[in-house]
Image (cartoon, grey):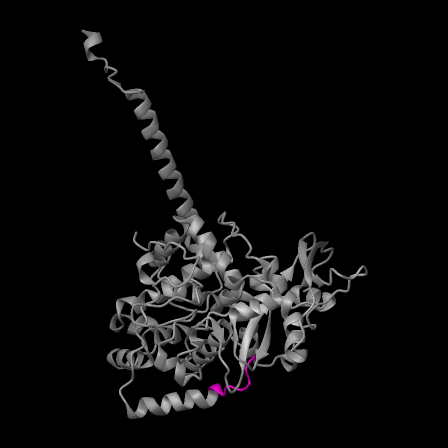
Amino acid sequence: MLADQLPKIVSYPMMKVPVLLRASFVIVLCLAFQLLQANKVLDKSSLEALQTIVNDIDDEHVAKYIDAFLRHPETTEELLTRGQRYFPLIEKELTVQGLPDALKVLPLIESRFDPMAISRVGAAGLWQFMAATARELGLRIDAYVDERRDPAKATRAALSYLNYLYTKYNDWSLAFAAYNSGPGRVNRAIKLAGGESSFAAIKAFLPEETRQYIPKYIAAQYIIQYHKDLGLKPAYPELDLVWTGTVLLNREMSITKIAELVNVPTDLIIDLNPSLKRQYVPKLSQGFDLVLPKRVTPTFQYFLDTDEAPGPSFAYRTMEIMIDKKVTVFEIAGLLKLDPYLLKSWNQLTEDVIEPGVQLIIHELYDPSQMLTQTISPKPFIKEKSNLQPLAPAIDYRQNLLRLIDRQRTRTEETINWNLHQINIGYYKGIGPGRIPGLSTKP
């Protein structure tokens, strides 16, 4: 009979088969939509439009790592938020050393923008230096301080080293490979490739982790540059974490004492000074560059100069301005007497050119104890080479690099096998608060 041929509705607790079918259909539609979105995002033309500094683009693997970021949007947004803390100092140092802006994304795949990150082979900091290499580049590592974890000093050393590697190979792909696995391994790969010095030619002779380094770098650059178009909305970090100043401290002092003097949480000072291994600043012959929120640096400097109890600190105030004509970030920063790299960070700008109609967020410092507030702004910064000075001229990177090369001639080169390009949760040892779950790179 016809009735016997019709499908029967089988009852389940609180649900019937048609309901299950509809739910399955919705799930299939969602998966199909995600696939379509991925294909749209990972379109080859969009990857080609990315102004990358490497030549060998493995579309398939790049797409896999971009998808890994997009499958965990909340975690990716937190990583981008963390990156906003360090972009100003990285971008400024890139300008000082005359290097491409695209290098600023490397700490995302190296350490997930975590200066406290430690790999299973012992590399540490934003740029994941092994101890021997860090010391050869002039970074201090002892019982009190580990400058691999100092964002500013490690950034200067890392970019200096990358500059040296690019000068050596004249190819950013090879420079990245040498940064990841060591120049010795890249040199051997070139010999095995019959003297061919392109990344495509030597790739087969490199470790798998090094072969994957460039696809991960391109994926990281894509995510950072186009995160708004991808629907990612990272929050901006607390202003105290981004707008900072440095005070040279030539005496031993506990973190607790510093926190009391400037009236900020102890955890904040620890977070801003990750190179400290203990709960106090040691007395060093060259002093210690203590990083504090910009609003309290005058207060602390007053205490150091006078040994008198400091008065109240400055406070932040925020305003918005509308751009009515096409200008650059550096032009606006010059008019407002602001650091252009901070201005870009405050507004999460990915380009130097600002179009008409854009609203910019501007932060200022003022003394809340004064009825007529006085604006305290950083020194004007103009993007001219004559105005750019290295942040730590006391470190002679050229001599350190020459010494590094000389040592490589007399001893077996230590392979810098950092293994830090993998983006997964089990990769780092958690030190301190605020750890973020890892991104899975598995397809």
Q: How many marks?
A: 0
Quick one: quadrant of the N terminus? top left
In the visual, does 418 lie left or right of 332? left
- Residue nearest the observer in this picture, 57 or 414: 414
Residues drawn in magenta:
391-397
Q: Residue at x 77, y 64 (%)?
A: 374
The image quarter containing residue 168 is bottom left
Q: Judge whether residue 394 is colored magenta.
A: yes
The x and y percentages for residue 281 are 50, 76
The x and y percentages for residue 249 are 57, 79
Q: Residue at x 56, y 71 (%)?
A: 291
In the visual, does 288 lie left or right of 61? right
The x and y percentages for residue 140 are 43, 81
Q: Residue at x 38, y 48 (%)?
A: 71
- Residue nearest the observer in this picture, 211 or 366: 366
The x and y percentages for residue 389 are 60, 81
**343 w.r.t. 30: above or below:** below
Residue that sits furthest to the right in the current view: 372
**401 w.r.t. 87: above or below:** below
Can residue 356 be seen here? The reply is yes
Predominant secondary structure, magenta span: loop
- Residue nearest the observer in this picture, 124 or 88: 124
**121 w.r.t. 48: above or below:** below
Can residue 91 be seen here? The reply is no
**334 w.r.t. 228: above or below:** below
